[in-house]
Each structure stands twice: as C-alpha cells, then as structure tokens.
Image: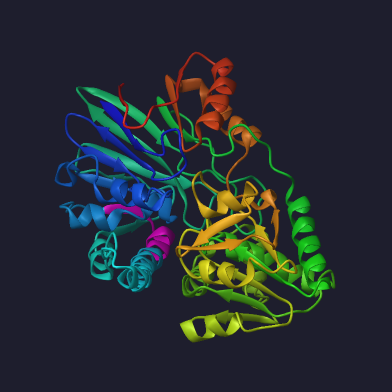
Amino acid sequence: MKITFHGAARTTTGSMHLIETDRPCILLDCGLYQGRRGEAFERNAHLPFDPESITHVILSHAHIDHSGNLPTLVKNGYAGEINCTTATRDLATLMLRDSAHIQEQDAAYLNQKTSRRGLPQVKPLYTTEDAENALTHLVGHAYDQWFDLDGSGRVMLRDAGHILGSAITVLELQDRGRTIHVGFSGDLGRPDAPILRDPEIVTGLDYLIVESTYGNREHPSFDQAANDLARAVRETIARGGKVIVPAFAVERTQELLYYLHFQTEAGELPRVPIFVDSPLAIDATNVFRLHLECFDDETRQHLLAHDDPFGFGGLKYTRSVDESRTINNLKEPAIILAANGMCEAGRILHHLKHNIEDAHNTILIVGYQAENTLGRRLVDGVKRVKIFGDEFTVRAQIQVANGFSAHADHTELLNWVTSAKESLKGVFVVHGEEESALAFADALRPLGNFAVTVPEPSQTIEL
C-alpha cells in the first residue's frame, strides 16, 4: 500500500491524497488549489494522475478546497461513486454548482476587459454542465456506519465537527493479506464550538493523515471572538461606515449570524441592516435547517423551538445580482457578509471594490487566508491591491478576528491525536503551510513510537 500526497502538502489548499493497494485506488478529497490565478488554473486543470484509474472517491466535506475539483475529475474520466455524508452531499450539490457559476461569471467579466485590451479570451476551469455531471456521482452515508468498497475494504465516516457534514474518514483496507486501518482527519473542528457537535475521537488506527492549518498557533476563546466581532461592528457603525465580511458561505456565515442574532437581541449591537449577499449562503442556511443530526444540543433545541438563529429582524438575504448591486449604493451603516472567504472570487470582490478605499469602513477577516490570496494580502497589510485587474488603495480598516476559526488549534489538534496514539505506526501531517506543519510534526514526535512525516508535494510513501 502506498499514499501519494498530491495536494494540501505543505500548503492548505487543493486537498488530494491517493491511496493505492493491490485492489482499490482511493482518492481522499479532490479540492481546488487556490492562489495566484494563472498557477491555480494550471494546477487545477491538469490532474496529477489518471482519473480513470481511480476506483473510489471519499469526500471529507464540502469546502471548495476539498471538493471543488470533482467536476474536473469526472470530466476527465472518473466513473465511480463520490462517497460522503448526507449533509456533505447536500452542501456539495450547492457548492459545486455555485463554483461553476462563479467561474463562468468571472471568465465572462474578465473577457469583457481583455477584449477591450486585445488580449486572449479565458475559459472557466469547468462549466455548470460539468458540475451537474459530477453531482450524479455523489452518494450520501450516515455517520458511524460502515460501507463496503467492492469487497476490498470498508469505510466509516465519523463527525469531524468542522462544518455541517464534515467527516473523519476511517478506512479498513485489505492489502497483500494484511488489514490496514487508515484515518484521515479532513479538516478537524474545535471542541465546544457553537452550532455543531464536537469532533469524535477515533482509535485503532495504524496510520493517520492529519491536518495542521493551525498546528503552530492557539486560538482566542469563542467569547473573545464574539467580543472582537461586537467591537468591530460598534466602532465602524459609530464612524458611519460599513462592515464588510468575507465569509465562507458554509459554516462561517451561519456562525456569524448566530452571534449577531444573540448580540443584537441582547442590546450589545446597534440595529443596522445586515445583508447576507450570497445565493450559496442562503441555500446553505436552508440545508443547515434540514440536518439536525449535526447540531449540538443547544442549537438543536433553539431550532426545534422555532427560535431560528439564522433568521431575525434586520437580516436580509440577497439573491439576485440587482439586489447585490443595490447594497453598494447604500450610504448608511450596514453589515455585509459575502463569499468568497479568501476574497478570490464571487460577490465579495465587488463589495471590496466599492468599499475598500473608504476609511470609514472595516474589512473584517474572520477565517484562514491561504498564501497568495487577496485575503492574505489584506491581512499582511498591503496598501495597494488588484481587484478584477484594477488597482485600489486600501483605506478601509483591516481587522482580524481569528477566534471564529472552524479549525482546531495546536492544543486541540495535539489532544485529538493523543487520544488515538496507542495503535499508531505513522502520522502524516498535511493541510498546513510549511512552518505550521513542521512545527506540529515536532510536537507530535514525543507522543509515542510512531513515525511522523510532513510529505512534500506529490511525495509517495510506502506503508
């Protein structure tokens, strides 16, 4: 048996790990690489393996850096099932359609500009038709139930507590007369986070592939994150400005609405219009309401009592392009949540374009920003940025509230691996920038008699 780490190796995007045995060939995730536009397109368009050779795909969760290149996989010949939880199936249906639509829209927008400059036309990575074809391969499974891999092994999905439907993948595989247990954390959530259940502990593994997004950092408490949010809103509203929040449509948007709901009802925030400007976030919020099995007891009881934390006075969901454009004509204070969370595509780019040069406004960063993304450049304090090819001066305040992260931090990751350490022979640290991954690997090594490896991109390791 061997594992090749084709994506999210010493970086945080493009999750893609290939497990090969004497029978099945299993792909864990097929995510979009996000970064510089030209490099990202080339990496995403040219898969580093033959899609027709893959026998099974296991999808850990619906975030685009884990699911977003499934249409390319199917378009190039993959014919099998894409296995995931039922909630991930429902969310991925929305997200892949939205991803294709955004890519088509962005290509059309850029082509309007390039045609005026006499430059070559660009094509979307994949189309809506490609996404629809991929969706026919999705197969949903319940948590904690084994399902078979055509007689060559079996898989169980455990709750990762990261976003709705996120799963820890547990594989029991037969290879040359051996039974090998492999675990893949996917993206691991945080204990005691609002809305979702805590990550489950997984034991009895021989090998573990574990994320390390925050492998060298600790998060502020959730209380501190809520205070940071309230303070940023109050200060911006007092200046007469708008709060622009690049937020992932799934999980982060719902979590922010949860806090804004309770803070507004408690009188901690002034009542101003709150816009969720993302058709995907609107649809995803409806999917949240369908999957009570993923919620913690407190959130489940709120929903069952019809006290909806995702819908309250002053909150406006905007779906159409015309409604989105109208928001940018507002002169009074408001809170605007829009995707994409790393400011690489979607409606957030239009809101940044219209608001980033106004010193009254605040750009509030509430999620991880990968290297070479616009969101990362804003966090790093650059003063000039390009949006749709045009340069803008950053005059709005840039504030960061890291406590909202849905990723486990250093201590939380370490505690989770410690619970599984007794049977481990090897741990592979992925989905973290190099400094973070290496630091987390160093923290793991004293835990026990197992090898710890930080794979290089596309490195193959024999088990």
User: Who's the residue at 64% across and 55% down the image?
Assistant: 366
Q: Is residue 172 left or right of residue 241?
A: left
Figure disc tally: 0
Residue occupying image coordinates x 62% and y 59% = 195
Kindly tell me whether residue 320 is visible in this rendering: no
Q: Which of 296 and 18 is in front in this view?
A: 18
- SS assignment for the magenta stretch, majority: helix
- Residue lying farthest to the top in this orientation: 449
Instruction: Residue at 46%, 71% (x, y): give it.
Output: 280
Q: Position of residue 177 (x, y in %)?
A: 21, 22
Q: Where is residue 128 in the image (x, y as percent from the top left)?
A: 28, 70
The magenta span reads: 82-92
Image quadrant where one finds the N terminus: top left
In the displayed structure, does residue 160 sit left or right of residue 354? left
* Magenta stretch encompasses residue 321: no
The reply to whether residue 439 is visible in this rendering is: yes
Q: Which residue is drawn at 37% across and 53% down?
A: 67
